[in-house]
Amino acid sequence: MNVREWALPVYTILMQLATGILFILWLIRSSKMQRVSSTDIDKLFRRPILVVFFTILLAIIGSHFHLSNPLLSFLAIRNIKDSWLSREIVFTILMFFSCAALVDQIWKPDKKSQHSTFILGWSAILFGGISIYCMSHIYLLPTQTSWNHWTTILMFFSSSIVLGTTSAVTLLFMDTIFIQKEEPQLAEIRSDILKRSLLMLGYLAIAGFIMVVILNVTQINRMQGGDEHLNISLSLLFDLYQPLVIFRFLILFAGIGVFILTAFWLIKKGKTLTELVVPIYLSCLFVLVAEILGRFLFYATHVRLGI
């Protein structure tokens, strides 16, 4: 794959990553609002949300490398009534500006309104989810038989879940450790939120992993009973790219497994966040590498029908 081809997996993965992280952060925020003051919990999320903002920005910049003339990219929004690509661009931009407004709200307490912060967060997540839905529909093409199936839509959302869960927790871990000297009064709150949230997020990570496996098995079964083009895709998957397929699922299983172990060590064994930095980082890294491999295989094994 050349630079222009790599721009697509970079963009799709980063947008799914950003949406997934923000969803997990807002899920935690919504569930902990009764126990922790809004001011304190927003302080915990300032830097992770800033990371989300720059991830979206990087995704938008990266997507331009796929264009022959990036300076004319704004013209793509003209066909919003008929084009899934135009819709994807519009909702990506809406998510970007919603997240920018959210960053402004959280980093400037004097301007903050809890109601508007709540709305901005879920609005950004909604726009991100619609953007993922639109980007998945771009691949539902009759000429691309391996992509033209409902599993493509769910695969994109399942990637967002597994990426978002492990990455959001890793960001909170790292932020808690690096900032504890500057904000010692929040150290106990941060640790308590992570302990109370990890069990729920562990179940979510397992559900996301199971969903990824089921969707891939469904896709493989579809290829086995399909036409010549699907059989070629299946042959590529299990002949040329078989080592990558095996490695992808092994490392994804390892990432989710380490994530669950980290939750167990923190909740049941009482280990400190500092002691668990390495495993939670490895969990995030393993899942990210697995999803990058999965996206590469998604593009590498498709076979175009017709001219």
Image: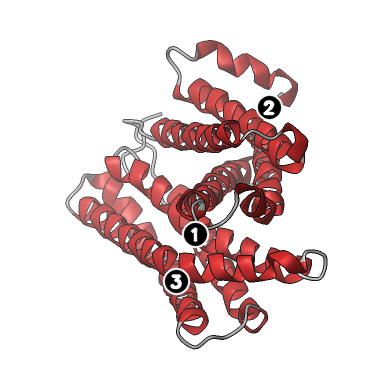
Residue labelled with disc 3:
256
Q: Residues within 10 Å of mark 1 (few under 14, many from 20)?
A: many
Callout 1 secondary element: helix
Q: The C terminus lies in which quarter of the figure?
A: top left
Which residue type carries mark 1? Thr
- Looking at the picture, how far across and down is residue 242, in whole percent? 40, 68
95 versus 189 height, above or below: above
Residue 244 falls left or right of residue 276: left
**Number of the label disc, if any, that sits on residue 251:** none
Q: CA distance from mark 3 to mark 1?
A: 10 Å
Q: CA distance from mark 2 to mark 1?
A: 35 Å
Callout 2 secondary element: loop
**Sequence-first tag of 2 and 3:** 2
227 versus 224 height, above or below: above
Extreme-bottom residue of the structure: 269
244 versus 42 height, above or below: below
- Looking at the picture, how far across and down is residue 275, in whole percent? 64, 84
Residue labelled with disc 2:
68
Q: Residues within 10 Å of mark 3 (few under 14, many from 20)?
A: many
The answer to whether residue 64 of the structure is visible from this angle is: no
Callout 3 secondary element: helix
State which mark lies toward you, 3 or 1. 1
Residue at 50 percent of width and 64 percent of height: 290
Residue labelled with disc 1:
165
Extreme-left residue of the structure: 225
**Sequence-first tag of 2 and 1:** 2
- Looking at the picture, how far across and down is residue 299, in whole percent? 47, 48
Report the front residue among 141 and 214: 214
**Sequence-first tag of 3 and 1:** 1
Report the front residue among 300 and 207: 207
Residue at 42 percent of width and 66 percent of height: 245
Snapshot quadrant of residue 53: top right
